[in-house]
Amino acid sequence: ANFVPDDPLYKDQWHMERVGAPKAWDYASGRGVTVAVIDTGIACEDFDGFTKGTDLAGTKCVGGWNFIRDNEHGNDDHGHGTHVAGTIAQTTNNGIGGVGVAFDVRLMPIKVLDKGGWGTTLDIANGIRWASDNGAHVINMSLGGPRNSKVLEDAIAHARSQGTVVVAAAGNSGSSVGFPGGSEGVIGVSASDSSDKLASFSSRGKGVDIAAPGVAVVQQTICQAGKNKCEIFPGWNGTSMASPHVAGAAALLVGMGVTDPDAVEQVLTENARVVDPSEGGKRLYGAGILDAAGAVRAVAFKQALLRLGLVALFTMLVGIW
């Protein structure tokens, strides 16, 4: 309880305090949970000139897949995926860089976007299927496009049938939500700023289920295309940066035993911090701004009541016997 990490950039990560991560850590850290990051890859290994991020050194990575090169090495040659992964599971309390929402999870790199940040709907759909079939409990997709497709919907439905929670960015169009953020079965995430206002770039409307910080989000990532051990700690903007906060919070809940995707979404949305209860506000923030602390506390309280009930029942049965 009352854990305070020693990471030097933690003081600049306003977004962690805003989603209640420090208080959530009193209950959970995501241990035993695997989160797939379907993106440009992650700086997860030392291979062929790529290196594992210094602030991911204590974070476990499991095998993923590179759909660009069709091999098992999902190394990041862009930087986007590593930054996203850091918000989920940056190594925490190691005296380096920043912290992650669910710092004890295992990261699964699924590379579907090339070094320019582009990819195909088919690769994304195949990445979703690969992740869910290979043990991912949570999927984060900080990517999207303007059109939905059956191949994408079918992949998401498959993942959900496997018990995988699917989280995705709403988009940065400033208008309607993109896909897969707006797809059925996906927790779509819009972006808020340090004043809890919707970011001007954030997509909004149908498909937004919850909001999370997405302005000046600080994490480690790679530079020089992942080579030469080049690393930076930028504060980036985007619903891409908001989505992994929610994916991390989902991983905390899964680690506490809430494994059904519908149940995870319900806990997150029911405990979100409402900033605008109007119908217009719901189009901006969905259920509200992510409150990871409120979500894990709600689960812990429910579990405590269940245990007390079982103890009382056992005591009564022993008395009757």
Image: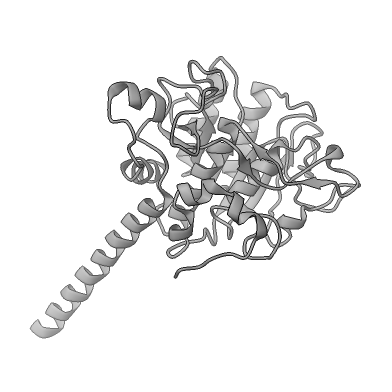
Residues 82 and 234: in front is 234
Q: Looking at the rendering, which quadrant does residue 24 occupy?
A: bottom left
- Colour theme: one colour
Q: Residue at x 84, y 51 (%)?
A: 51
Q: Picture coordinates of residue 222 (x, y %)?
A: 78, 43
Residue shown at 41% from the left, 39% from the top: 289
> Could you tell me which residue is drawn at 38 percent across and 44 percent down?
268
Q: Quadrant of residue 321?
A: bottom left
Observer able to see residue 284:
yes
Q: Quadrant of the N terminus?
A: bottom left
310 in relation to 118, above or below: below
Q: Residue furthest left?
A: 320
Q: Nearer the viewer, residue 30 or 83?
A: 83
Say if 84 sits above or below 8 in the image: above
User: Residue 155: x, y in percent?
Assistant: 55, 30
Q: Residue at x 46, y 47 (%)?
A: 18
Measured as percent of width and height from the top left, residue 318 is found at 15, 83
The count of marks equals 0
Give the side of residue 279 with respect to residue 15, left or right: left
190 left or right, relative to 78: left
Q: Is residue 78 above or below residue 73?
A: above
- x and y percentages locating residue 293 in the rendered image: 40, 54
Q: Is residue 99 visible?
A: no
Q: Compared with residue 34, is residue 181 higher up or lower down, i.e. above or below?
A: above
